[in-house]
Image (spheres, rainbow, N blue to C red):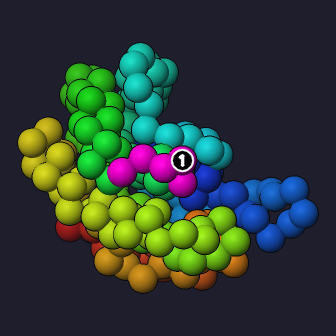
């Protein structure tokens, strides 16, 4: 199965443990651990839910994946948006992705944890609301849905990025969902 993965630094594979940050080695990132899948990783550090025209419909047509995954919203939370505002943006973004006719799996990001990047209650509390709102968006848009906020993903010291164990756990859960498809 060919999968095009749209996401932020956790899709990209950002490793915050180095002084300036780097990327986890191949085989550590969850996108490298999907069983029997050819993955086009379109993860971008710092990405928020896009507004307006994007390159993704063109990338979908170019790569012709069997499935498109979308996991975004963490950076929007960190910038102070509410879960409701993010869900509204996601709904509009999904309109552009469903046009090329490929199935879309919307994945709600893991719940933020307190750490060096997450010091206040508000982003944590809003991240707890995102899964339910994304589930409703997915139903309205005819998308598949997974809530990784229920997966107990191990994070690094910053409260935002997956640890190597977090990438492994995320891949295990997603592989289970992909087998059901």
Q: Quadrant of the C terminus?
A: bottom left
Q: Secondary structure at mark 1?
A: loop
3 horizontally vs 114: left or right: left
Task: Work out whether residue 5 or residue 137 is closer to the camera in this orientation and state it.
Answer: 137
Q: Residue 29 falls in which quadrant of the image?
A: bottom right
Highlighted range, magenta: 78-82
The residue labelled by disc 1 is: 79
| Residue 68 left/right relative to 120 | left
Give the main secondary structure, helix, strand or loop, of the magenta stretch: loop
Name the residue rendered at 14%, 39% in the picture: 141
Q: Is residue 82 visible?
A: yes
Q: Quadrant of residue 14?
A: bottom right
What residue sits 41% from the left and 17% below the top? 53
Is residue 53 found inside the magenta-colored segment of the image?
Answer: no
> Number of numbered discs present?
1
Residue 120 sits above or below residue 36 on the image? below
């Amino acid at each position: 199965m060919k999968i095009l993965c749209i996401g932020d630094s956790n899709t990209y594979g950002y490793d915050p443990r180095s002084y300036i940050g780097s990327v986890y080695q191949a085989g550590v990132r969850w996108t490298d651990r999907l069983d029997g899948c050819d993955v086009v990783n379109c993860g971008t550090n710092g990405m928020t839910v896009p507004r307006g025209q994007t390159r993704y419909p063109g990338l979908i047509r170019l790569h012709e994946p069997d499935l498109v995954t979308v996991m975004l919203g963490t950076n929007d939370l960190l910038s102070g948006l509410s879960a409701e505002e993010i869900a509204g943006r996601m709904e509009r973004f999904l309109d552009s992705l469903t046009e090329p006719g490929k199935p879309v799996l919307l994945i709600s990001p893991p719940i933020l944890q307190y750490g060096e990047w997450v010091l206040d209650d508000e982003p944590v509390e809003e991240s707890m609301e995102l899964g339910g709102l994304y589930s409703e968006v997915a139903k309205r848009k005819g998308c598949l849905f997974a809530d990784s906020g229920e997966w107990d993903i191990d994070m690094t010291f910053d409260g935002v990025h997956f640890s190597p164990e977090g990438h492994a756990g995320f891949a295990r859960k997603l592989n289970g969902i992909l087998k059901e498809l």
